[in-house]
């Protein structure tokens, strides 16, 4: 468990044992968990909203009276997953992995927080979201989530591996962190 703003966040049993996980901030770990939970629930045909609602309230992203942000989060994940060109890999906090889907989500939030609108549009285009299929709606959602993160003092740093997204979305985390690739 990781503590953030007085709340305990589930981040797997041995965060320190997994370098890929340990280098993330508590807000990032929460977001990674939320994306992974949403994906597991969707895969099993379960409604992720009730548990996500409680989690969003616990960390302060929602006050419990308005589920708008939870529903926007769910809609964003479904749109990216269903509207993307390639397949996505979801990680597992208990296994110490962060998948491409979680990285795309965190990259989008970090670009929004840094007001990198052009890069955010490029990222969304790389995952198959254009003006014709919801890119502007997703940008509005990302901006809302990013703003709420900022209000709470939550920061999503731009990580070096995010530069790979501008070469193309890899099909696996192994391709994403392959050191032989370079950015020109």
Image (tube, rainbow, N blue to C red):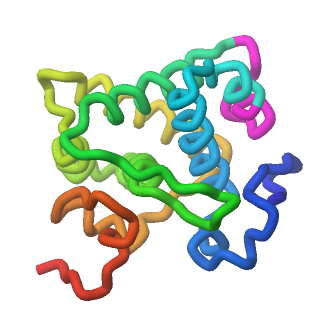
Compared across the picture, whether 5 is left or right of 153 comes to: right
Residue lying at the far right of the rendered structure: 6
In the displayed structure, 105 sits above or below 158; it is above
Residue lying at the far front of the rendered structure: 44
Tally of numbered tags: 0
Residue 177 percent location from the top left of the image: 36, 75
Residue 121 percent location from the top left of the image: 21, 43
In the displayed structure, 45 sits above or below 99; it is above
Residue 110 visible from this viewpoint: no
Does the magenta run of residues contain 61? yes
- Of residues 78 and 5, which is closer to you in this image? 78
Residue lying at 80% horizontally and 35% vertically, measured from the top left = 58
Residue 71 percent location from the top left of the image: 54, 19
- Of residues 117 and 70, which is closer to you in this image? 70
Residue lying at the far top of the rendered structure: 65
- Of residues 56 and 10, which is closer to you in this image? 10
Compared across the picture, whether 97 is left or right of 107 comes to: right
Residue lying at 62% horizontally and 79% vertically, measured from the top left = 19
The residue segment tinted magenta is 55-65
Residue lying at 83% horizontally and 58% vertically, measured from the top left = 1
- Of residues 151 and 145, which is closer to you in this image? 145
Residue 152 visible from this viewpoint: yes
Q: Quadrant of residue 92?
A: bottom right
Does the magenta run of residues contain 6? no
Compared across the picture, whether 104 is left or right of 10 comes to: left
Residue lying at 39% horizontally and 56% vertically, measured from the top left = 100
Q: Quadrant of the C terminus?
A: bottom left
């Amino acid at each position: 468990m990781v503590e953030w703003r007085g709340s305990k966040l589930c981040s797997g049993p041995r965060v320190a044992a997994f370098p890929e996980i340990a280098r993330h901030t508590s807000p990032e770990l929460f977001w990674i968990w939320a994306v992974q939970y949403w994906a597991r629930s969707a895969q099993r045909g379960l409604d992720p909203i009730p548990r996500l609602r409680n989690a969003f309230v616990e960390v302060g992203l929602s006050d419990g009276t308005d589920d708008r942000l939870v529903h926007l989060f769910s809609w964003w994940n479904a749109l990216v997953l269903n509207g993307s060109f390639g397949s996505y890999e979801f990680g597992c906090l208990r296994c110490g992995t962060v998948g491409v889907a979680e990285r795309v989500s965190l990259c989008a939030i970090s670009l929004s927080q840094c007001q990198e609108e052009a890069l955010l549009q490029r990222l969304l285009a790389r995952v198959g979201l254009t003006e014709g299929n919801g890119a502007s709606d997703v940008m509005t959602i990302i901006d809302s989530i990013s703003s709420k993160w900022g209000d709470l003092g939550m920061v999503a740093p731009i990580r070096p591996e995010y530069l790979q997204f501008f070469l193309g979305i890899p099909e696996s985390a192994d391709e994403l962190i392959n050191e032989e690739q370079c950015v020109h």
